[in-house]
Amino acid sequence: MRRVPISPKAAEEIRKQLDLFEKRFGRKPLPGEPVFFDPETSGDAPRPFDPKKLMHQAIAALRAAGADEAVLYAAEKTDRLLTRDSYAAAPRHIQQEWDSAIAEYREKIEKR
């Protein structure tokens, strides 16, 4: 197993999540179980978050915060939410897909 250094804030958030897990399921997480689980699922086993649901929630929060609608359109269209850094690190075909979605949005707006 490889150790990865994390910030004190990240360590605290993980501790909080482990406490939440233990309160919800009455035990520590087993190997392979998601520590960050979907609290809305029922049952006695943790389930990971639905990626589509997370994306929808992230886009809704960003929209409420006034984020650029072209970026939100691209996120919805590509199922990715790229930051400047993740865009720069992404493979060229991902960048092209993102750029095309941004351009498509801008063209739709200009036609109005």
Image (cartoon, rainbow, N blue to C red):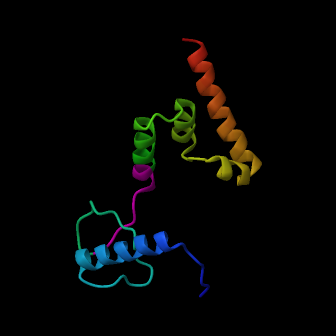
Relative vertical location of residue 76 with respect to residue 10 in this rendering, above or below: above
Residue at 58% in and 19% down: 108
Using the image, determine if residue 7 lies above or below residue 54: below
Which residue, as the protein is rendered here, is positioned at the far top?
112
User: Image point 38% across, 84% down: which residue?
Assistant: 30
Residue beneath the point at 63% across and 20% down: 107
Tell me, yes or no, if residue 34 can be seen here: no
Q: Nearer the viewer, residue 78 or 29?
A: 29
Q: Position of residue 71 (x, y in %)?
A: 57, 36
- Left or right of 83 in this view: 54: left
Where does the image place residue 103, in percent across and percent down from the top left?
66, 28
17 or 27, nearer to the observer: 17
Q: Main secondary structure of the magenta part?
A: loop
Furthest-right residue in view?
92
Q: Is residue 77 magenta?
A: no
Q: Tell me the quarter of the image containing the N terminus.
A: bottom right
Residue 16: where, in percent of width, then height? 35, 73
Residue numbers of the magenta segment: 45-54
Q: Residue furthest bottom?
A: 1
| Residue 26 placement: quadrant | bottom left
Residue at screen point 61% across, 23% down:
106
Q: Quadrant of the C terminus?
A: top right
Residue 47 lies in the magenta-colored region: yes
Q: Against 102, is 48 above or below?
A: below
